Image (cartoon, rainbow, N blue to C red):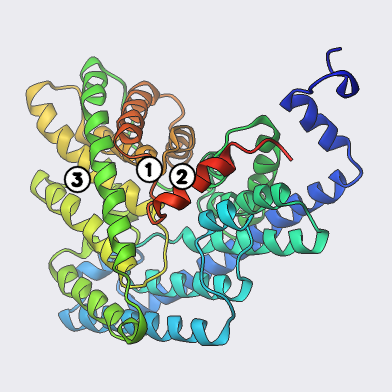
Amino acid sequence: MRGDPSRGPVTAATASLATLAHPRAATFWLAVIVTGAGTGASAIVLTRLLEAVQRLAWPAAPGILQAAAHGSVTRHLLVLTAAGAVTAVGQLLLGRLTSGNGIETTTAIWFTAGRVPRLRTLGSAVLSVVVVGMGASLGREGAPKQAGAVLANALSDRARFSDEQRRLLVACGAGAGLAAAYGVPVGGALFAIEVMRGVVALRMVLPALVTALVGTLVARLALPDGPTYLVPAYATSGSLLAWSAVAGPIAGVAAVAFVRLIAFADRVKPRGVARMFVPILALATLGTLSIRFPHLLGNGHDVTQLAIDGQVALPLLIILLLLKPVATAGCLGSGVPGGLLTPSLTAGAMLGGALGSVWSGWWPGAPPGACALIGAGAFLAATTQGPLSATVLIMELTGQARGLILPLLVAVATATLIGRTLDVRSIYDARLSEQQLRERQRIRELPPG
């Protein structure tokens, strides 16, 4: 009886094999490859656009932190106020020139089987790249994720895929966008199924991995091939393992606070005529704060790198731990589009570095830089509710395969456990109502189809 669909229930694995053998399977796999290639190409275009905008807005140095640190007060105020004006005008044009309401990619996967408004979503991706390049405190990975989702949705329309196939392909496209932007194929694939799709299932692993791999390979034709963060040769110690067991739950609690802050920011988003002046006010405020704390600008890559190097003093770590999440929530709440993954990494690095600085004075052997890296992974895992993808993303973003894997896993596991105990929401579904959360859970439990 085993493996005979005509004589009894089939297992999920058998159903997956049957799906692969279906005549339309070739069409789906072709769509997977095209989605990966198109998303990789879009990541190149969007990255080049961001670099051009950043050079124009902050021309003094290659990194936004260094350039902003040497920028004049006038430049800080003018550039960020202009970013607010660009946001206001961009959102107004998107609302008038495109049909349908904007929808976040993860929400679309859960509630509309991955159907997203194409022109509006692409327009939002371009707007995101422009304002993040000018200094908005959000991540740049949101744009290629949106581009990948739009391409996957269009291919699903053309091939007339089922809702389940569309959900999977759109999640794969979004994951490929992350993979192509940062050169993280395995992390991008896991992010697609664990965070975007919300189900870690064998039938989803290979499509997600192929899409992310193709996207990364295409992006590498023009984008640098190397770790996003350079990590010193840190090693695991008893002190660092003990610190991870203590810091993980703290990161989980802090991540829940961040998720709730994002949920609040979404609830108070401006509507009506307020959409024209609230982004200007919010980003002008960010520009004022950035005169003293240029670390708040952009996705936080530069200050995260400094924290991993152990080059950020404890007082500044504490200040940025408080201000960076508020700056990110302020941008998002004012209507600025952008990603939340890299700001989560930055907040976690500030928390880990601060806790490590205190701990190292009591029990040497836990370098604050190593603690910053582990804190970033733990905080990301708890905010995304994706411990597997967060762990692999940290390894791929840094090129660290083994050196800190044990304390990283301890912190990631405990942070995610505490986060899920306190709040079932991730940073991507923080904006959902209770009814939508229940519907999301129902969709997660649907059988393969």
Mark 3 = which residue? 311
> Which corner quadrant holds the C terminus?
top right
Q: Is residue 306 left or right of residue 171?
A: left
Number of numbered labels in the structure image: 3
Give the x, y percent position of residue 295. Answer: 23, 60
Image position of 113 with respect to 268: above or below: above
- Label 1 close to label 2 by CB (< 8 Å): yes
Q: Kindly indicate the quadrant of the structure image that contains residue 310.
A: top left
Q: CA distance from mark 3 to mark 2?
A: 19 Å
Read off the residue under disc 2: 227
Please name whichever residue, 246 or 180, is drawn nearer the observer in this view of the structure. 246
Sooner in the amino-acid sequence: mark 3 or mark 1: 1
- Distance between the Cα atoms at labels 3 and 1? 13 Å
Q: What residue would you read off at disc 1?
A: 230
3 or 2: tag closer to the N-terminus = 2
Q: Are marks 3 and 2 in contact (CB under 8 Å)?
A: no
Q: Position of residue 176 (x, y in %)?
A: 60, 51
- Under mark 3, the amino acid is Gln
Compare residues 373 and 226 and report the one nearer the observer: 373
- Dot 1, how many residues are within 10 Å of its Cα: few (below 14), some (14-19), or many (20+)? some
Q: Is residue 145 left or right of residue 130?
A: right
**Of helix, strand and loop, which one carries label 2?**
loop
